[in-house]
Amino acid sequence: MKVVTRFAPSPTGYIHIGNLRSAIYPYLLAKQNEEGSYILRIEDTDQARYVEGATELIEDTMKWIGLDWDEGPGKGGEHGPYFQTQRREIYIEWAKKLITKGRAYADPTPSETVAKYREEASKNKQAFLYRNYRPSETPEWELGMPLRFKADPKDRYYHDEVFGDMHMAPETQDDIILIKADGLPTYNFAHIVDDATMGITHIFRGQEYLPSMGNYLALYEALEVEAPKFVHLPHILAPSGNKKLGKRDGAKSAVDYRADGILPEAMLNFLACLGWNDGTEDEVYSKQDLIDRFSLDRIQRAGARYDEQKLVWLNGQWIRRLFAEDPKALYARTEGFWPESAADYDDDYKFKIFSIVYDRLKTFGDLKTMTPYFFEDPSVDMDMLTSNKALKKLSEQELCDLLRKATAKLGELKEWSAEMLQQTLNDLLAETEQKPATLFGLIRLSVSFAPFSPALHDTLSVLGRETTLARLNAVITCFGRD
RNA sequence: GGUCCCGUCGUCUAGUGGUCCAGGACGUCUGGUUCUCAUCCAGAAAAUCAAGGGUUCGACUCCCUUCGGGAUCACCA
């Protein structure tokens, strides 16, 4: 069977990570099907909430994380147009079918009156049902009037791919608005028409739509349309509390993570595994792994808490994995993440630095704080030396002498390579009879004045002879001054 | 209030009647890897399987009840 899925966001702002997952699963399902198709549809029927540029942001996010759509904006396809505002005639046409069948009517009730009804219902501690107030006489519908569905409340049943066999009671079904006064359809109506005309086989959406299923089922029936398969996804929960993750909990845009230096591979991996797993003990999945292994029946029913620590861990895993595969390619992706002072340096030099620091990066964002001493001389901070746990056992004189010996020995070095430096450093250890913590710590700090850095011989080899010796001498000078 | 959903370590989860006095991963803690930080490796703590009743020789797994949590009841999606 051909699988056609869709992601149908509304352009009301950025896509936060809670929503992005419902773009990923339909993609995976479509891609694991030989002739599967994945459609991007923009649900822009709410003009009040429309945000300029949001569509571009959505496309940008999807491209970043690697969800390429087969049909949709910028791509075209046989089921277009892909913006709902460009599909008005289709909705009107379908709505008229319902009117003809007596299943839809123009609603003459002013919205203030409806609001009053609603208050009344809530005062009586009842669910609000407009059909309890259905007017006996209604005008003939024309554009500019809200059009309502005429419900046929009864017990309805369907099978949900995630939640199993479901029952919707009659009191879940109401006379919902089909077409708004502005002439545009509501989501409730539009998505059914669109999915039917686009040949969608599986609907993926958040479980907040579950209570509306009674209405949708009634609509499929009245429209004489075969219902697709339903895949309702459990919520992603905010880091604290039990509420679903939303923008007000600080749910960031997916692309904000790009700016923080999170790899799309890690984000995809993380999101896909929030509420789904393949039953193995694996943790790291590439996009292809996910396509190969994804299955609807292993989607979780309970909400999953959004745990950024796991995302960061996965990012580290991906940095190491991608470096092992192709270091240069990964390096190329670090552009924009280096400290400002790195601007004057060439790629060869930065690649060398990247090669020795990559495996202690959690995100590319760490590059800014971990590498500045490779690009500019750090200011000498004598306190940092004298308060160091290993170094404070020695007097300043002793430290200074040690530094002089080291500088002299390194200065004689003919070949400035990581291997030779390691050899020399070891010799120095034997000659001075110092512990590595003392000698290496002293040199490391003198040259970087950073709380941490890569292995000493690697650091010095990248820094180069001239810079290394100059920085050591600068510290010696400071000792002399005291 | 009506309707609907959910409930295994702090977190993500494995588990579909016996191989589970519950396994893995993140996080936490301890130790190791010639300096720091990280990686990597080894190990530890961490779930009376929400509770109570059944069914069964046997239940985390099936049934019922209770409790707890969440969603929804818009001319928003």
Image (cartoon, coloured by chain):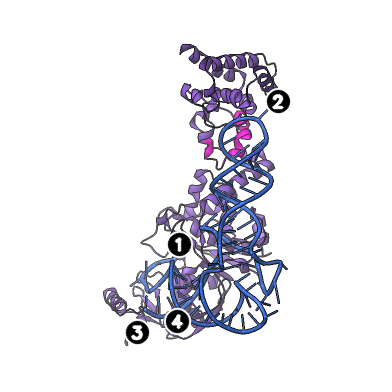
Chain colours: A purple, B blue
Query: Which amino acid does the dot numbered 1 rest on?
Result: Lys
Which of marks 4 and 1 precedes in the sequence?
4
Residue A76 x, y percent position in the rendering: 56, 60
A186, A429: nearer the viewer = A429
Residue A223 x, y percent position in the rendering: 50, 80
Dot 2: what SS?
A: helix
Whether residue A376 is visible, yes or no, is: yes
Query: Which amino acid does the dot numbered 3 rest on?
Result: Asn
User: What residue is disc 1 on?
Assistant: A244
Which of marks 3 and 1 precedes in the sequence?
3
A275, B52: nearer the viewer = B52
Quarter of the image with the N terminus of chain A in it = bottom right
Q: Mark on residue A419?
A: 2
Question: Which is in the foreground here, disc 2 or disc 4?
Answer: 2
Q: Mark on residue A98?
A: 4
Q: Quick one: which residue is furthest to the top in this view? A: A480
Q: Mark 3, chain letter? A: A
